[in-house]
Image (cartoon, helix red, strand yellow):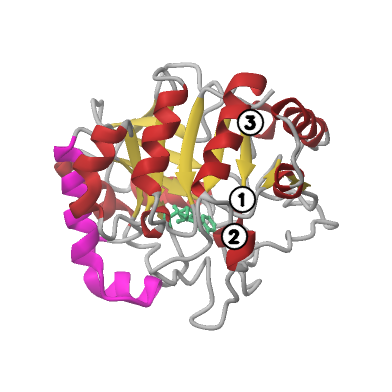
Amino acid sequence: MATDLRVSLTDRCNLRCSYCMPAEGLDWLPGDDILTDDEVVRLIEVGVRHLGIREVRFTGGEPLVRRGLVDIVRRTKAIDPTLELSLTTNALGLARTAATLQAAGLDRVNVSLDTVRADTFRTITRRDRFHDVVEGLEAARDAGLVPVKINAVLLRGINDDQAPELLRWAIEHGYDLRFIEQMPLDAQHGWSRAEMVTADEIFGHLEREFVLTPVDEPRGSAPAELFQVDGGPATVGVIASVTRPFCGDCDRVRLTADGQVRNCLFAREESDLRAALRSGASDEELADRWVVAMRGKRPGHGIDDPSFLQPDRPMSAIGG
Ligand code: SAM
């Protein structure tokens, strides 16, 4: 059973990364459909008490734009102080909130940053906010939200030649860098298997400047393959969801901002906990629905199969 719950708190975002959202014109989920803070916390509690959830990662859209975030973190930690709480964020505004989030019970952050060049950042995200991300990263480290991890996506012809400089910068600043293969989850359906930058290419770029040695530890359910850089202690990770899928070891389950349980990023079916919750279901009934949703999990995401169909929801409305 899945023990790692990804909770999307909103589908809205203040960046417009080209591999995730179109430049303009993506409809938001209707406001009434979005779970209230109380509903989010109740469903997390059902997951913890009835389904063995041990880790909760808040995501989105951009979770920092959710007004009740600090309170949701505090109330989630109160369910069980041994829960591991993390946040996947673009770090805009994190400089102001990192210490408060840490005090509320947040343990770690994963910050998305694909380049350390301000002009490339603007090209990819369509916003001129590179320096805010850098400030957010520093604030996270200073607040003890460590290890601070950075997630990077490489795009052909845009930043695929920047992998070594991003790694060098991350190591210099004490952040753990992971490259993620681009997946078919963009709202505009622009992904192409032929265009995406593969893990093999990423290794090729990095190995021109660094010696990578596989970390000698069992990977477990971790999505990243980890490598020591130049003998360590620094490491770099590669999450090869497309070319080296790790579905058999996946321990994740997702709750969307509008209360749907998804057993896989690429699932084409969802289970509606919001409707059940709003029509008065007990915790046990909610847990039963959740278990049934998890039983339907397929053995693999099938991206490389000719019959693969991209899910209707884009990444921003699922929660990455
Ligand atoms: N706004 C937050 C952020 O930027 O981290 C959280 C949501 S974002 C959807 C979560 C992660 O998904 C980010 O690291 C982002 O780079 C990644 N992502 C989005 N679309 C992707 C795609 N098509 N392929 C791979 N990763 C993607």
| Magenta stretch secondary structure, dominant | helix
Q: Which residue is mark 2?
A: 317
Point out residue 7 in the picture as x, y percentages from the top left corner: 54, 43
Q: On residue 256, which mark appears?
A: 1
| Residue designated by label 3 | 250
Q: Along the line of sight, which residue is nearer the eye, 87 or 28?
A: 28
Q: Amino acid at mark 3?
A: Cys
Instruction: Between label 1 and label 3, give the one nearer the viewer.
Output: 1
Q: Is residue 133 above or below residue 77?
A: below
Q: Quadrant of residue 149?
A: top left
Within 10 Å of the Cα at label 1, are there few (<14), some (14-19), or many (20+) other Cα atoms?
many
Q: Which residue sits at x=77%, y=29%?
A: 291
Q: How many marks?
A: 3
- Residue 99 colored magenta? no
* Secondary structure at numbered mark 3: loop
Q: Quadrant of residue 283?
A: top right
Above or below residue 18? Residue 42 is above
Which tag, 1 or 3, sits closer to the chain's start? Answer: 3
**Disc 1, disc 2: CB below 8 Å?**
yes
Residue 142 among those drawn in magenta: yes
The correct choice, above or below, for 81 with respect to 14 in the image is above
The residue range painted magenta reads 116-143
Q: Which residue is located at x 44 percent, y 69 percent? A: 17
